[in-house]
Amino acid sequence: MSNTTSNITRRNTLQLISASLIASAGYSLLPRKAAAAGTITVLNWKGYGTDEVWSTKAFQEATGIEVVHDYYSSEPEMLTKLRTNPGAYDLVVLNAARCAQAMAEDLIVPIDYSKVPNIASVAEDLRSNKNFNKDGVGYAVPWVWGMTALAMREGLPKADSYAVLGDAAYKGRVAVQDAAVGMISVAALLTGQDMNNPKDLDLVKETLKGFKPNVKLLWSSEDQWSKSFAAKEFDVATYWSGSSVRSRHVSKLPVDFVVPKEGAIGWVDGLGVPVGAPNMEGALAFANWMIDPKFYVEWATKIGAPASSNAAAMEALPADDLSRQIHKPEYIATMSIMSALPDERREAFNNLWQEVKAFYAE
């Protein structure tokens, strides 16, 4: 997922409800207090799961480990902090694409999965993703994930392909995100190409231009999307999975989230241990806590959270939970996960998208 898209998606996911809750009893797979006491420092976005007060309090009561935080406001800033502060952090939250970069720069160390027992029920497709692994060794605990795919007005036939964005039946009734990487990913998947490195950008461009008669709106925020959908300005759109949950649950909008046969555009955030971590054992205990079903259900149902990488955690959600219904485990196997893009490729994507937008405006 692009920086902009992933940042918006993750932060908005946590705005469903604001509450302070004290976790109830019994996180079964935690170390005893004597096993890994002290303090750990976590580097993350502010307000993104790891710093929930009720959670860190319950974790400290169970383990004796105090959790403190430092924050970043962009993924490049996160990498800079890791480069310039060796030994300052015990755990870092990083997107899959940035994990690959951190591995390449030797900023994080391999994970001892024996210290993370909850990893046993994490989807293998996430554990084995190339962005989290080097030379067959895992460098992060997959934590949470989400998707970009299609959203359709309830009652319409569910599309089986991104080709619906160019279907004449929806002339003037389509909204697409104003995001170069996201839209090029859609067109790449539709044309059977690697969305992270499409070889035929001319075909991608022509595919996107083919959507012109249908495109009513270029949306840039969840709020804009929801208001325009509520005003019945469009019926079919690209959209984020977590946002679709909020659109139905909070805004009561008649939205169906649809993953077509080409698969979703996926993002995954992981938990890594920086080089020189002062309390590696404590960091891994906290990573295990973050994917524990008891923690996740509390976070997801009371605060609002992305989908857990832990299948057991998703299955522990209420059967009627919208996030559980939308984030089906089979989608993990079919989605393409966004990887880091070289600067020249990102520039090419941006230039192509600007040309397509200018064509839409003609």
Image (cartoon, helix red, strand yellow):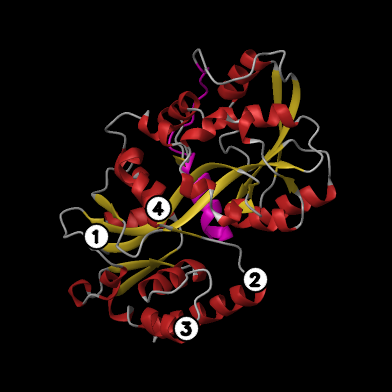
Provide the secondary structure element on which disc 1 rests.
loop
Q: Which residue in the protein does label 2 denote?
A: 342
Residue 33 in the figure: left or right of residue 124: right
Dot in front, 4 or 3: 4
Residue 199: image x %, image y %?
A: 50, 81
Q: CA distance from mark 2 to mark 4?
A: 25 Å
Distance, label 1 to label 3, CA atoms, is 35 Å
The circle on residue 333 is 4
Residue type at mark 3 is Asp
Identify which residue is drawn at 44% across, 70% down.
183
Q: Which residue is mark 3?
A: 200
Q: Secondary structure at mark 2?
A: loop
Q: Earlier in the sequence, mark 2 or mark 4?
A: 4
Q: Residues within 10 Å of mark 2 (few under 14, many from 20)?
A: few
Q: Is residue 327 visible?
A: no
Residue under pointer 1: 232
> Relative to 183, is 153 above or below?
above
Question: Magenta stretch?
Answer: 1-23
Measured as percent of width and height from the top left, residue 226 is found at: 35, 53
The residue shown at (17%, 73%) is: 169
C-alpha distance separating marks 1 and 4: 33 Å
Cα–Cα gap, marks 4 and 3: 25 Å
